[in-house]
Image (cartoon, grey):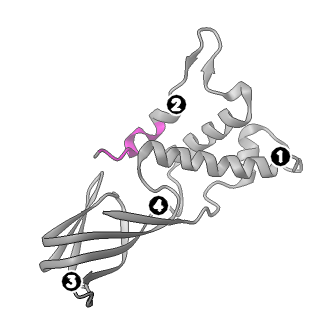
Amino acid sequence: MYISKTKTYSNLISLTEVKQDLKIHESDDSSNAELQRLIKVALTEAEKFTSIDIVPTVNTLEDYCIYGCWYELPEPSINIIGISAFTESNIMTVLTGYSLYKFNNFTHLKFNNSLNAHKLMIEYSAGYSTLPDDIKHAIKLKIGEYFDVEKNGYIPTNLQKSKSFERLLSPYILIA
């Protein structure tokens, strides 16, 4: 199985929100470029930690030698854009008869008829158009940790690392 991803880093967390959280005056634009970069870095870090798409993403999955009625997709919340099956002689059929069953850590795709395909291509979208509050808070904590030494997540008395980022994102972790 091979999945290619096209991410759209839209305005999931605004620069204004980050500046308010870091107590930077809105008119101070000296660190805008750095903060924009850190927003993207923190979103990427959250996606690596959870193993799901948080940023709106178009995925193209390609798999070979598919037989049967069921196929499992490695994302919990998706929208199918299109499904194509190919024979060994590379004749394409667009598949429309299917049902989606969404679970916490994956999505089952059930075809109405048994599938016998040399190659299967599924294009689907995943990610959030609006971030849940706990994910947004975790991202802002990570931005603060990267930007501001005083918010770096370490408790100075015993140098123990705070686990706030991990705790906020733990309900979203994809368990394989």
Say which label, 3 or 1, has the lower sequence index: 1
Say which label, 2 or 4, has the lower sequence index: 4
The residue indicated by pointer 1 is 31
Along the horizontal axis of the image, is 86 left or right of 81? left
Does 90 appear above or below 167?
below
Q: Are marks 1 and 2 in contact (CB under 8 Å)?
A: no
- Between tags 4 and 3, which lies in front? 3
Q: Position of residue 114 (x, y in %)?
A: 10, 78
How many angstroms separate mark 1 from mark 2 (CA)? 25 Å
Does 2 appear above or below 144?
below
Q: Tag 1, which secondary structure?
A: loop
- Between tags 3 and 1, which lies in front? 3
Residue at (26, 56) in percent of width and height: 103
**Which residue is at the front of the view, 65 or 144?**
65
The residue indicated by pointer 4 is 127
Q: Is residue 172 magenta?
A: yes
Q: Which residues are magenta?
A: 168-175
Residue type at mark 3: give it: Glu
| The label number, if any, that marks residue 88 in the structure image | 3
Say which label, 1 or 2, has the lower sequence index: 1
Residue type at mark 4: give it: Gly
- Res 100 → quadrant: bottom left
Residue type at mark 2: give it: Ser
The residue indicated by pointer 2 is 164
Residue type at mark 1: give it: Ser
Q: Position of residue 51 (x, y in %)?
A: 41, 48
How many angstroms separate mark 4 from mark 3 (CA)? 33 Å
Q: Residue lying farthest front?
A: 89
Say which label, 4 or 3, has the lower sequence index: 3
